[in-house]
């Protein structure tokens, strides 16, 4: 458990093999799960669509990223599924929700951590 009283978890739309590969390369020591059925994404109200992946804002962000030396590799999972960032309390209460509008959105990590920290601090005060 981290300083904010939270654990980090990734959920991807690829296969379990993709999840293991991502964990090994990008997130050692962090839980990574696969949901190729996209049930988790649907239950959280996350957007899915070609326009969200290939729309002007996403294409521009991709071009900027490429110019900075970050090259897109092979897509694993559903290329049209947009992601998000959630801070979820152990009982399932959503403390912070960011549902990406398109592929150009970046995670608002500071906001998610503040929400988790506030929840954790309130729990500690209550006990």
Image: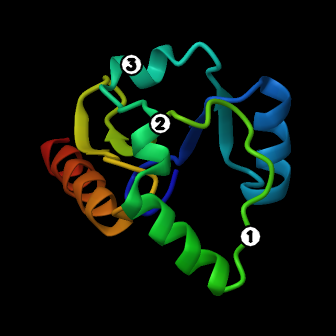
What's the CA distance linking mark 2 and mark 3? Answer: 16 Å
Between 101 and 34, the one lying in front of the other is: 101
Left or right of 69: which side holds 59? Answer: left
Residue shown at 85% from the left, 50% from the top? 24
Relative to residue 116, is residue 35 depicted above or below?
Answer: above
Between 4 and 106, the one lying in front of the other is: 106
Relative to residue 120, is residue 117 depicted above or below?
Answer: below
Left or right of 79: which side holds 88? Answer: left
Which residue is the site of mark 1? 71
Residue 122 in the image: x percent, y percent? 16, 49
Residue shown at 79% from the left, 25% from the top? 16
Residue 127 in the image: x percent, y percent? 20, 41
Left or right of 93: which side holds 49? Answer: right
Which residue is the site of mark 2? 50
Q: Nearer the viewer, mark 2 or mark 1?
A: 2
What is the number of the mark on residue 42?
3
Residue 55 in the image: x percent, y percent? 41, 52
Q: Secondary structure at mark 2?
A: helix
Q: Nearer the viewer, mark 1 or mark 3?
A: 1
Q: Earlier in the sequence, mark 1 or mark 3?
A: 3
Q: Residue 47 appears in which quarter of the rendering?
A: top left
Q: Is residue 37 visible?
A: yes
Residue shown at 29% from the left, 52% from the top? 116
Residue 100 in the image: x percent, y percent? 35, 47
Q: Residue 67 appears in which quarter of the rendering?
A: bottom right
Q: Earlier in the sequence, mark 2 or mark 1?
A: 2
């Amino acid at each position: 458990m981290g300083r904010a009283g939270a654990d980090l978890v990734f959920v991807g739309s690829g296969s379990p093999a993709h999840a293991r590969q991502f964990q090994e390369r990008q997130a050692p020591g962090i839980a990574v799960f696969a949901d190729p059925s996209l049930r988790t994404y649907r239950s959280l109200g996350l957007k899915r669509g070609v326009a969200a992946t290939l729309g002007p804002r996403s294409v521009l962000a991709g071009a900027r990223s490429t110019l900075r030396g970050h090259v897109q590799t092979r897509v694993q999972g559903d290329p049209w599924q947009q992601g998000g960032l959630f801070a979820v309390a152990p009982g399932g209460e959503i403390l912070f929700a960011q549902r990406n509008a398109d592929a150009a959105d970046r995670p608002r990590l500071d906001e998610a951590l503040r929400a988790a920290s506030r929840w954790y601090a309130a729990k500690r005060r209550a006990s």
